[in-house]
Amino acid sequence: MATSRRRFLTAVGAAAGGAAVGAAGGARRSAAAQPPGSFDPEALLDVHLHGEPSVSAVAAAVQNDPRMPSAAEVASWYTDRSNWGRWGPEDEKGAINLITPEKSAAAAALVRSGRKVSASRVFEPEQHFMRKSDSGVVDYYGFIYHGQTITHIDALCHVWDGDGMWQGRSHDEEITSQGARFGTIDAWNEGIVTRGVLLDVPRHRGVDHVTLEQPVQGWELEEIAEAQGVSVEPGDALLVYSGRDAFLRAGGQYGGGERPGLGVSCVKFIRDHDVALLGWDMMDARPDQYGLRWPVHGVLFKFGVALLDNALLEPLADACVEEERYEFMFMGLPLNVARGTGSPVNPIAMF
């Protein structure tokens, strides 16, 4: 049995037996415990990093769906179908390699009306200092963009599992306090310009938003694509709208703990269709019924799929209805940051 599959099944067995999956490294500090006006990088990391997974009654109920895959099937998606080495052992672009010049040119041909829709949330840095002179002003921004707030793109080095980061590299060797050495965001310094496809989950379900009790599933994405009359093709930017803002307006809380979002069965859909970028307003559903820390985020380091986290997709979903089509030209232009694990971004859909 492959090492990664053995680890996966061991983790699932522990979760099924009621063992909690705890945070490595012991106790963590809370940002709320810091004095007002203080700046504690460790506390900010605690706020922004994803919460630890657990298995709850909600997850157990989802598992009872006969369409849910077995633990061995899920493991096979991330082991037997990994993209490590697909574009060579030194490749740092991952599935963005699928966006050929021809693919980008075809995306440009989708532009008809010239309508532009931003998929970025308003960016409010934790620190914003101003320095004004007699003739102008400059700003200083201090922020951690990973997490559940700022719209950003994850580089391939951002997260990993026990088998390593993208291409099986060791994070101990590739990640230092001065930055990353492999799979960094500047590998995509030419920008990500491709065909975008939005799948509108709430509209398909006839509800306002996805709920904790009913995560988005891979077979559902197939059904939505068919109902919308759109296909998901190799090299596409797949944007999955789950209704996060409607969920918040209804009083829901979205963070690192229990939250609605995409279930692990979406992984197979992403790999089957050779998606280059996944954009989502709701990320991995938590708790995960398999006890995985990265149930869907794993597409980043296993398949090389770029992740557009915290996208603002409600305006884009409305635009798709008005334009009567769910495909468009997608442009995601991360900052060309040396050694960076990601970048804030203002993604644009153009009809």
Image: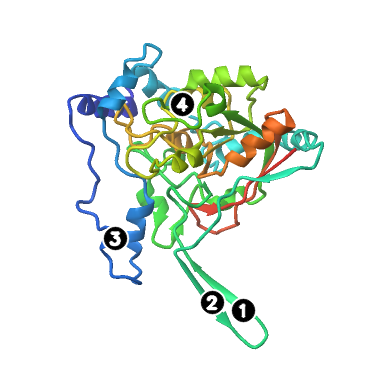
Mark before the other along the chain sequence, 4 or 3: 3
Q: Amino acid at mark 2?
A: Met
Left or right position of 270 against 285: right
**15 above or below 319?**
above
Q: Residue furthest top?
A: 66
The answer to which of 199 and 178 lies nearer the viewer is 199
The answer to which of 138 and 249 lies nearer the viewer is 249
The answer to whether mark 1 and mark 2 are in CB contact below 8 A is yes
Read off the residue under disc 4: 216
Q: Amino acid at mark 4?
A: Val
Q: Amino acid at mark 3?
A: Ala
Q: Residue at x 56, y 17 (%)?
A: 223
Report the Cα–Cα distance between label 4 and label 1: 46 Å
The quarter of the image holding the C terminus is top right
Q: Which mark is residue 130?
A: 2
Mark before the other along the chain sequence, 2 or 3: 3
Left or right position of 282 against 131: left
**Label 2 crowd bin: few (<14), some (14–19), many (20+), radius 10 Å:** few
Mark before the other along the chain sequence, 1 or 2: 2
**Label 1 crowd bin: few (<14), some (14–19), many (20+), radius 10 Å:** few
Coordinates of residue 222 in the picture (x, y in percent) = 56, 19
Left or right position of 342 against 8: right
Q: Which mark is residue 32?
A: 3
Tag 4, which secondary structure? loop
Report the Cα–Cα distance between label 4 and label 3: 32 Å
For the question of whether residue 71 can be seen, the reply is: no
Coordinates of residue 56 in the picture (x, y in percent) = 25, 29
Read off the residue under disc 1: 137
Coordinates of residue 229 in the picture (x, y in percent) = 67, 19
Which image quadrant for residue 274? top right
